[in-house]
Structure formats: structure tokens, C-alpha cells
Image (tube, rainbow, N blue to C red):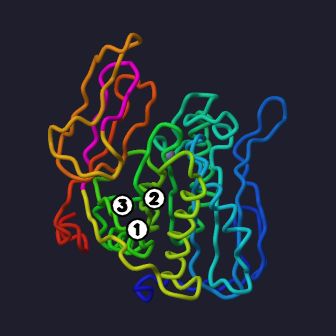
Amino acid sequence: MSGDLTPAAKSDRSFHLAENVIARGSKTIVEIPVLTEPDGTTIVIPILVVHGAEAGPVLNLSAGQHGDEYMAGEACRRLYQELDPARLKGTLVAAPCINVQAFKAGSRLTPDDRGDLNRVWPGRPDGTLTEQIAFSYLHQVVASCDYLLDFHDGGTWLAMEPLCGIDRVAETHLYRRSREMAILTGVPVLWADDPWPGSLPVEALRLGIPALTVESGADLDEPEAVVAGHLRMVRSLMCGLGMLPGAADAGGGSEQVCGKFARCTVRGLFKPCARRGAHVDRGDLIGVVVGTTGAVVEEVRAVASGRLLFLRRLSVVQPGERAYLIGEPVDPTSVNGGESV
Ligand SMILES: [Zn+2]
């Protein structure tokens, strides 16, 4: 399959990223400027670049759009440390922490403007800080890459099964190549859905770059397992793209689903009643929302039958926030090759 994914060869032996020139067979850390604050400090996006000794694809790993999701950034840092540029074909461009302000605050949202970065792409050069982060990253980093993998995890409030998400865009060749990427990760669950407005993968696709969202995040007390899972799927993808020796893991995309969310309608404490990863039937009790005295103020039930891919942890919930995601099995041929897009 990697033969279908071979990008145009780069004629220049150096890799150019924004104002930076990275010599072939080397690795370095660069900073992408976003804006300078009135006190003179500059907000930047750190980028870890490994430019392989041999020509090959340029793979972008984007992590930390949400500042409370630490695991993918950790995987990016470890991958940067372990990769030997002398043995790499192509280039890894990894952002462990796109939204540095949100990371510092340990917050999903940018603290300066309460923006959710993965809802504002393509951003604006003269917009809010969140919009300027998006604009800078899209044009100075993503536009220089051949493939994009946008990493997320459950943060502190959501437990989730590993899954790959792709957008069912009208450009079938981009849909097919994104789907091939998903399969090369070796992750069984493949969720193909309508494009998510304002998300990074949708804007990458608009630039003609195949793109994938990866979600993972099981137990908070097992962070090493989550990081290991992230690393396994990226290494598998890199093997499949021909960047590393070896074959991609088998089993990728073997469980194809469409996603069904449910949101809570009241404020209170969400108490999960089901188990992440379990099969549920339509109407099953997934969780309850209780008030301060323990009285149940809302029952949250399954809106479809399938596997519970996301489940909110024991946490305070606000009206409109997600409680779970059910992956409803779909006929693989309905998302095979994009004919039904
Ligand atoms: Zn996220």
C-alpha cells in the first residue's frame, strides 16, 4: 500500500520550514512565531524536526491543540529522541504542543480568549490568539507537509478507546489516501464521518494534504500505556509510508463505525454506569447526572447500539457537553474507497 502513498520527491536536500533550513540527515528544534505581546514576549509554537538522510514523505504530527491532553505530546518528544536521522527516509515534523498557552494552564481552551483551537481553523492573522495560532501553524508548518496526523486524547475528563477518524470529503482521492493512512496505523477502529467544521484535518485536506485524527486515552493511572499506544501507531504508519523499515501493523481499519454522540442537558456530576469499550444496546443506561445531594437529575441512555468508544469519567458536566460516543458498526464497503462520499 505504501506504493500508492509515495509523494512527489523533494529536489532540495535541505528541508525548509518557515524561515528555517534543516540539513539532510539531522534533527533540530525550531520555533514558529505566532505574535509578540505588548511586553515584548513572543508566543511561539515549538516544532521537533527530524530530516532523514534519504528522501521520502514529510509527516506532520500535531499534538496539544487541547492543553489538557498530554499523552500525544509526550509521544512526539520520545519519537524525536529515538529517531536516528541516518536511518530515516523522509521528514518528521512534530508539534508536541501547538497551543502552548493552553498547555501552561493545563486547560483544553486557550486561557486568553477561551477559544477551542480545534474549532477555529483556518484561523485569522488578525484574530484572537487562538485564531492566530491556527493561522500561523497552518501556513508555516502544515503547508510544508505531505501527510498530517492530528493527535488527541481524553484529557482528564474522557476515557476513550484508540480510534482513527477521517473526514468524508468530496475529493475522493484525498478521502482514499486518508483512509489508507488510518489503516497503516494498525488501529482497528476507523470512524469516517462528515467533515468537522473548523478542525485542523479539514483545513489540511483543503490544502490537498491527506489527514487523520487519532484519539486515544484509557486510564489516567496508566499514562505509559497510552503513550506506548500512540508510539506504536505512529511507528506503524511510518513503516507503511516507507519512512522506517518494516511493515505496518495488521488489523488497521477492521472495525468501521459511524459515531453517535450524546450530550448532557443539565449541570451536575456525571457518574458513568457503563464500561468503556463495552457493547451497548439502544436504550441502555450509560450514566446519570446527579445534583449536590445525590438526586438523579438526568439519565443518559444509549441512542444507538454499538461499542462505547468514549465515555465521560466521573466529572462535573455542563449543559451541552458530551457524555459518550457510540461506534455504530457500518458496512465496510460503504466507506471503502469513498464511492459513497
Ligand atoms: Zn483534543
Looking at the image, do the residues carrying marks 1 and 2 touch, with CB atoms under 8 Å apart? yes
Q: In this picture, which residue range is highlighted in magenta?
A: 258-273
- Mark 3 beta carbon near ligand 1 (under 8 Å): no
Residue appearing at x 40%, y 37% in the figure:
312
Residue at 20% in and 59% down? 329
SS at circle 2: strand
The image shows residue 135 at horizontal and vertical percentages of: 58, 48
**Front in this rendered view, residue 273 or 248:** 273
Q: Amino acid at mark 1?
A: Val
Q: Quadrant of the N terminus?
A: bottom left
Asked whether residue 264 is drawn in magenta, I would say: yes
Tag nearer the camera, 1 or 2:
1
C-alpha gap between disc 1 and disc 3: 13 Å
Judged left or right of residue 237, residue 14 is: right
Residue ID for mark 3: 166
Question: Residue 71 in magenta?
Answer: no
